[in-house]
Image (spheres, grey):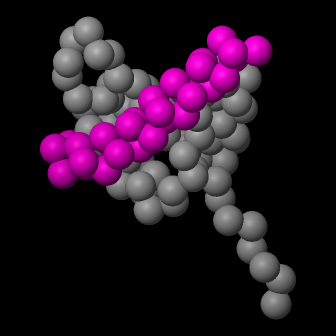
Amino acid sequence: MAKSKKIQKAVALGYDEQKGTAPQILAGGKGLIAETIIERAKEAGIHIEENPDLVELLAKVPVGEEIPPELYQTIAEVLAFVYSVNDRFKNKMKQE
């Protein structure tokens, strides 16, 4: 039996610290749309979190909507990780 290629899925989140609201879904899709989302994130230097279970949950949230409260903790952990990586990178660049 040939292995079927798994369809790629992606969801893009945005968070505006100034507004202080929950992160919201900026884009989402599968296949070519997912590939485009991932490629644009890479080009922009945006962190990509590979978590299929989280993508499945977030893909159910309509584009433009805030994430549901049940996902706040999980998304907060991802954002905290991203912010710490960004800070370390900025500090490393300042030292060079």
Residue 41: give x, y in percent of width and height: 64, 28
Q: Position of residue 66 (x, y in %)?
A: 25, 31
Using the image, determine if residue 60 lies above or below residue 76: below
Tag count in the figure? Answer: 0
Q: Which residues are magenta?
A: 68-96
Secondary structure of the magenta portion, mostly? helix
Q: From the viewer's perspective, tell me whether residue 30 is left or right of residue 54.
A: right
Residue at 51%, 60% in the rendered image: 52
Res 1 seen here: yes
Q: Nearer the viewer, residue 58 or 49?
A: 49
Q: Position of residue 82 (x, y in %)?
A: 49, 35
Task: Name which residue lies at 31% across and 50% down.
Answer: 74
Residue lying at the far left of the rendered structure: 69
Quarter of the figure with the C terminus: top right
Q: Nearer the viewer, residue 26 or 70?
A: 70
Residue 4 placement (x, y as % from top left): 74, 74
Please name the residue shown 26% across and 9% down the image. 18
